[in-house]
Amino acid sequence: MRFLLPVFLVALTVVAQIGYPLTVGGARDRITIVVVLLSAGAALAHATATRGIRYALGFLTLVSGIGLLAEVIGTATGVPFGCYAYAADRLGPALLDVPLMVALAWTGGMYPVWVVAGMVSRRTSSRIALTAIGAVGWDLFLDPQMVADGQWTWCDTDSGLPGLTQIPYTNYLGWFAVALVMAGLLAVWEHAAPDPVLAPPASALAVPVALFLWTWLGSALAHATFLGLPSSAGYGLVGMGVLGVPLLAVSARARR
């Protein structure tokens, strides 16, 4: 029963994201906020169901706290992502010009990546590295989509990947560094937090796996077909595939 809420929130997240390419202007901004709230809610509800409220609050504090700090420093100094700025008054309240929704988005996006990295590798060092790589893969979808929508803009718009020159390489290096710090601290928290609540393995993993697969494969399809972003569709498919392909292999072995 405790998994009904996260499953319900995942279903609503999928429905909201399907609505994203069907909207424009203010309606799309509202959909973006709803997607962030639902995905973060699904992540925290699942973390609570499997590890308890203390673990979930610790995850939120670490990931959203570090994410917000990195974004505030980044917009003020250009480190570690590069020089960029958020659009004003589009994603709700902001702290030092960084929308608070952005901090919450880190939690919604990092949670499934962290869980899947733990499924793919049981070694802590490998899990940390895979989490950072998976986070960059997620951003290969996220940044092009949000830049195309005008949610933030870069000072340097001519030194990125082929087909994505408007987003500089420094962005992905910054993402890797910030995600690496997050994952390292999460590894510590994983051992410090209370023991996991007993649950059947399939029930315990279905929610983050579904979120991961939807973000990976659903974003690739949406970028290629509905959003007119074929380059990010390919980059994101490969980037998140570093975790996604081993995940599919692990799942196939488990079924056998």
Image (cartoon, rainbow, N blue to C red):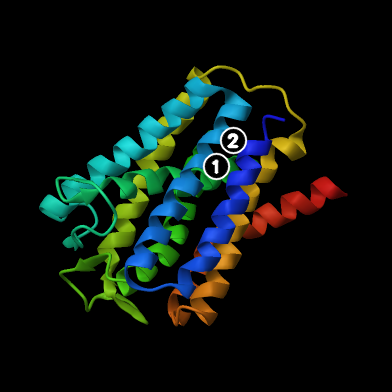
Q: Residue at x 17, y 72 (%)?
A: 156
Q: Is residue 101 left or right of residue 212?
A: left
In the image, is residue 168 above or below residue 16?
below
Q: Nearer the viewer, residue 42 or 143?
A: 42
Which amino acid does the dot numbered 1 rest on? Answer: Ala
The residue positioned 60% from the left and 49% from the top of the image is: 10
Whether residue 45 is visible to the viewer of this picture, yes or no, is yes
- In the orientation shown, which residue stands out farthest toward the left? 77
Assign a secondary structure to mark 1.
Answer: helix
Mark 1, residue position = 42
Question: Toward which corner of the image does residue 204 lie, by quadrant?
Answer: top right
- Which is more toward the observer, 95 or 194? 95
Q: Percent position (x, y) of residue 102? A: 32, 50
Q: Which residue is mark 2?
A: 46
Task: Specify the label residue 122 is tagged with.
Answer: none
The amino acid beneath tag 2 is: His
Residue 135, percent across and down?
44, 53
Q: Quadrant of the N terminus?
A: top right
Q: Residue at x 49, y 75 (%)?
A: 223
What is the residue that sits farthest to the front in this orientation? 27
